[in-house]
Amino acid sequence: MDDLRELYQEVILEHNKKPRNFRILADANREADGRNPLCGDELTVYARVTADGPNDGERLEEVSFQGSGCAISKASASLMTDFVKGKALAEFKNDFDRFHRLVTSAPNTPAETEGLGKLAVFSGVREYPMRVKCATLAWHALRAALDEKGEAAKTE
């Protein structure tokens, strides 16, 4: 468990210091704001969604974000943008559910991390319920952008 905590801290610090895909996506065709009023995290997620073909559905061709927030919020957004890039929207919805279960499951149960790659380090967040909203903010914002309701994301 100490190895996982050490990796968690290392990954969070790395992605907070040098977040991936931290920019406005000029040709985005979806975007949504996300705000966590409890700790002041604010970000905007941008996505360029394209259709693969008449029967293939839509795909997240490019994803980026900008904003400010705590290390967990920024690292989660950074890792999420890399993880979901190139995926079909249906895959994202499945990934959203899996990530949400990972960070909200009981700390004393085995974490379901298979297929989540580096996102698995966020299993440590479930030990700190106040930090779950930080970890999920970007995910909720991207889901709101894809739903195209024009509303700010909520972490509830």
Image (cartoon, grey):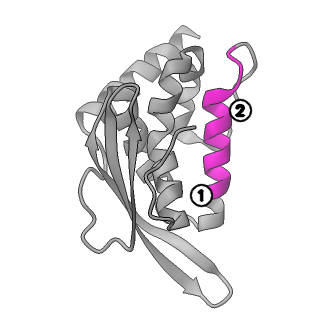
Quadrant in the rendering for residue 14? top left
**Label of residue 49 in the image:** none
Q: In the depicted view, which residue is nearer to us: 119 or 34?
A: 34
Crowding at mark 2 (Cα within 10 Å: few <14, some 14-19, many 20+): some
Q: Where's residue 33, x and y in %?
A: 37, 52
What is the number of callouts on the image?
A: 2
Q: Where are the magenta residues, as a range? A: 92-107
Element under disc 2: loop
Question: Mark 1 belongs to which amino acid?
Answer: Phe
Kindly identify the residue that appears in the image at 65 percent across and 28 percent down. 104
- Residue 122 as seen in the image, left or right of residue 75: right
Q: Is residue 113 visible?
A: no
The residue that label 1 is drawn on is 92
Element under disc 1: helix
Q: Quadrant of the C terminus?
A: top right
Q: Is residue 38 magenta?
A: no
